[in-house]
Amino acid sequence: MSLFLGKRLAIDLPPPPIDPKETDRFGLPLWFTLLERVDAREVRIEKTHALVRDATEAVIRQIGRTEARRMFLRALRVPLKGKRPDAKENELLLAAYDRAIARGVPERHAARVAAAEMVTGEEDVQSIAKQIRRLVKERARRQAEEKARSERPPTTLLGKALRKSEADF
């Protein structure tokens, strides 16, 4: 392919890097445009639906419907943007808070005392104390959730019968 400027040949161009017939491992086209024919688009979408159906059935057969649902939801989750929480640092902050509570520091001051222990120099005690308070609040929420979940009878036939018998009393 060549590019012409007026009457003379300016430069030779390499072939385009995109092969419109190139497909992925599922046989679906890698490149499609807004200019694709309607029938080609319908075929591509139908192939995609068939692939999703087959893959879903295979996953359900292997690990069960509930676990497959969890896996698909996890796979479709939008990745976090920005800074990720540091689990090790959070554990250290919570441990410092727990040590402060064990020493008898009142709860309202424990986050600030723990933050003062953890400051390395460039960090601010107030911001670390705020982070500790958020971590403590999140931990309390998770513990309350787990407690409520453990107290709730299972939704089995026996669990339903037990709930019904408790309501009769």
Image (tube, rainbow, N blue to C red):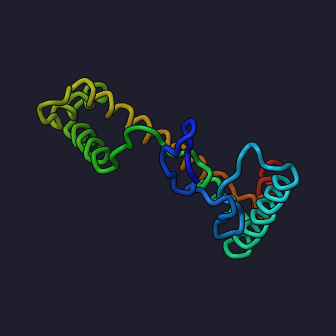
Relative to 95, say whether 121 is above or below: above
Query: Is 127 placed left or right of 144 in the picture?
Result: left
Image point 67% across, 72% down: which residue? 63
Q: Which quadrant of the view contains residue 21?
A: bottom right
Q: Which quadrant of the view contains residue 145?
A: top right
- Looking at the picture, how far across and down is residue 96, in whole percent? 23, 42
Relative to 20, say whether 101 is above or below: above
For this orientation, the residue located farthest to the bottom is 62
For this orientation, the residue located farthest to the right is 39
- Looking at the picture, how far across and down is residue 1, in whole percent? 58, 54
Examine the rendering and report whether any part of residue 143 can be seen.
no
For this orientation, the residue located farthest to the left is 121
**169, 147: nearer the viewer:** 147
- Looking at the picture, how far across and down is residue 143, in whole percent? 48, 46
Q: Which quadrant of the view contains residue 6?
A: top right
**150, 33: nearer the viewer:** 33
**62, 111: nearer the viewer:** 62
Image point 21% across, 35% down: which residue? 114
Image point 77% across, 53% down: which residue? 163
Image point 64% across, 53% down: which residue? 73
Query: Is 137 placed left or right of 123 in the picture?
Result: right
- Looking at the picture, how far across and down is residue 126, in whole percent? 25, 23
- Total residue callouts: 0
Relative to 25, say whether 45 is above or below: above
Examine the rendering and report whether any part of residue 77 can be seen.
yes
Query: Is 143 placed left or right of 37 in the picture?
Result: left
**10, 23: nearer the viewer:** 10
Query: Is 49 placed left or right of 86 in the picture?
Result: right
